[in-house]
Each structure stands twice: as structure tokens, then as C-alpha cells.
Image (tube, rainbow, N blue to C red):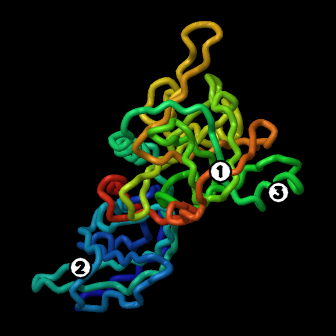
Amino acid sequence: METPLCTPHNIQICEVTCDSFRIGWDMTPEDTARATHFFIDLSRKESRDPNRFKHRDVPTKLVAKAVPLPMAVRGHWFLSPRTEYCVAVQTAIRQADGDYQVSEWSQVVEFCTGDYAMEHLQQLLDKASGSTGRLLKFSVFYRNQHPDYFENVRSECGGLMRPSLKDNSGSHGSPINGKLSGVFLSCNTEFDTGLPPKDSPYGSLRFQVPAGSLLDANTSLYFADFYCMYTAYHYVVLVLAPGGSDGDNFCRGRLPKLDLSSNPFLTCIAPEAPGEEPLFCHASDVILEVLYTEPLHLETGTVEQISGHHQLMSLTTANAKKDPSCKVCNISVGR
């Protein structure tokens, strides 16, 4: 009878991305020479399946031919970004009858996948570019909230709308989720009037500020996300950060930077002659969510009652989950 295989130990996870990782472990020289296959049991931490491969079972998870360690694991599961996983390994020798001699399972090791890398965000950007429609003129950024919000800003914050941490709405792998703070603004206008919509799902009062107060040649503009919520319309998340600010430094290297004068989402065209105003345009067929990374004082703009209703709660995006089945806004590395 063959000598039993030793249990793999000292499991190591490295080079973790949003959809791949490398895994290695320690084996005796004898086992390294004998092993023909590796079995890898991977599951999400919060829903771990306690059923593991048993001796002589037909493997139902990843079976890989033995290769030098650490081995790359990619494409065998739909790994999701920013998700905690549990992994264990087993070594095996395939025998002449097709059965396996196997080791005991290793200890369970936990790890967490990463954010979308720049290449993944570029894929999202490319998809978003195909859904934007033509550019429409706009003149103000605005933010709708309930009266209590603005009352609190005045009484507790000295009139300053302070940045708050981006929630987990949209694509799970967006690098700004839970990491970058800002004040969310809108700039979409109604097609027929060129003005902000009369209705809002966020509240009956609207703060609005001239576009040129926040967007000029010294401002950095970044693409951060593209998603939908089981609806026909799509959202594009942009980050607006003054050049050299903490927000700008955070986004640089993490998010694709957009050319202010030439991109499909939000543009600022410098005036051609002295005395003329810059031209600001927004994409017409997507809803833009603009995260401005600095505090905003109410005195830089105006706060007024909107003329329409504000009960369109189906349009709110707080912690909204992205539709994983949408072919328009999903890429192949998880949601």
C-alpha cells in the first residue's frame, strides 16, 4: 500500500485581485514528486458549504493538475470583488483505475478579493460610453434633500455640506465604495427645458451652484462606475476633485481620468473669446451622479423649493444593488 499523502500546511494566498489569486502551500519532497492533482475547495465565507470532498468521492469543485506552486486560480469560479472567501486544499494521486489517493484537507484559510483594477474600470467606461447619448448643455450642479438636512447643515455645520463616505451602491468592485468621501451632486437637465428636473426622489429642497464654481481647467474628473438597478435607465458615477486635493490624490492611479473638454459624460469647453462663459454639457441618456470631494458651503449657491413632487423613491440609489444580469453594464469579472 502506498504511503499516505501528508496534509498540506502553511497555506499562503498572494497576488489577490478582484477575480483571481495565487495559492501555495508546503509539501514534503516525496509528496511533491508523487502528487498528480490538487483539489481546491473555495466558497464565500458567509455561506460556506460544510460538505467537502471525501476519500474516493468524485470531485465537484476545482481539480487541477499538479503544477509548481504558487498556482494561479482564475476563471474557475465567478469570483466577486471585495468578497471574503474560504479556501482549503487537498493533494491527490490519480491511480490507474481513475480513482484518487488523497491527503486530508488542509486548514481553512480566509482571504478577501480586491477592487476593480484600472483595466476593469476601463471596460466599464467603454460600456458606459455606448449608452450616453448626445451631450446637452447645463449651467448648474444641484443637490436635493429634505428640509431637515439643510436645517442641520445650517445649525450644526455652520452652513457647510461636509463630504460623507460613499456607500456600497453600484458595482461592488468600484474603488470608491466605502473609501472616498464627497458630496453627491446632479447635473442632468430636462430635455425640453434645459433645466434641472422639477421632481426629485431625495427631497423637496434643492441646493444649486453655478457649474463654473466647481468645474474648471484646474479640476480633475474621473470615471468611477456604471450600473443599473433592474431598470432600463443607467447611472454613471463621476468624481470631481480639485487638482492636488486629497480626493484627486486618491483617484489618481485608481480611476480612469477623463479629458474635461472631450469625454462622453461631462464636459467643460473653455470660452473662445474674452467675456464669454465656458460651455458645460452632460450626457443625455444616463443619470450622472457626481461626487465632489470637497466641502460645499450653502453660501456658494442657493437653496429653493422645487416645483414638482419628491416622492419618486424608486429612483433613489442609497446602497442600491447592481443588477448582475444586465448585459449593458456588467463586465466579466463579477459585479
Q: Say the numbered circle drawn on residue 257.
A: none
Name the secondary structure under disc 2: strand
Q: Hey, what amino acid is under mark 1?
A: Ile
Badge 1 or badge 2: first in the primary sequence: 2
Per the image, the residue denoted by label 3 is: 151
Residue contact between numbered discs 1 and 2, judged by CB atoms under 8 Å: no
Between marks 3 and 1, how big is the CA–CA gap?
A: 16 Å
Camera-side residue of 146 and 73: 146
1 vs 2, front mark:
1
Per the image, the residue denoted by label 2 is: 93
Q: Hey, what amino acid is under mark 2?
A: Ile
Badge 3 or badge 1: first in the primary sequence: 3
Residue 67 in view: yes
Camera-side residue of 31 and 290: 290
Q: Please give left or right for residue 179 compared with residue 266 in the image.
A: right
Residue count near mark 3 (Cα–Cα under 10 Å), binned few <14, some 14–19, many ≥20: few
Q: Which percent across, then down, holds residue 12?
A: 48, 67
Q: Quadrant of the C terminus?
A: bottom left
Q: Which percent across, then down, holds residue 259?
A: 49, 27
The image shows residue 118, relative to residue 60, as above or below, that is above
| Residue lying at 29% horizontally and 57% vertically, measured from the top left | 327
| Residue lying at 70% horizontally and 53% vertically, measured from the top left | 205
Residue contact between numbered discs 3 and 1, judged by CB atoms under 8 Å: no
Per the image, the residue denoted by label 1 is: 306
Between marks 1 and 2, how big is the CA–CA gap?
A: 71 Å
Q: Quadrant of the N terminus?
A: bottom left
3 vs 1, front mark:
1
Q: Which percent across, then down, holds residue 209?
A: 69, 37
Q: Hey, what amino acid is under mark 3?
A: Glu
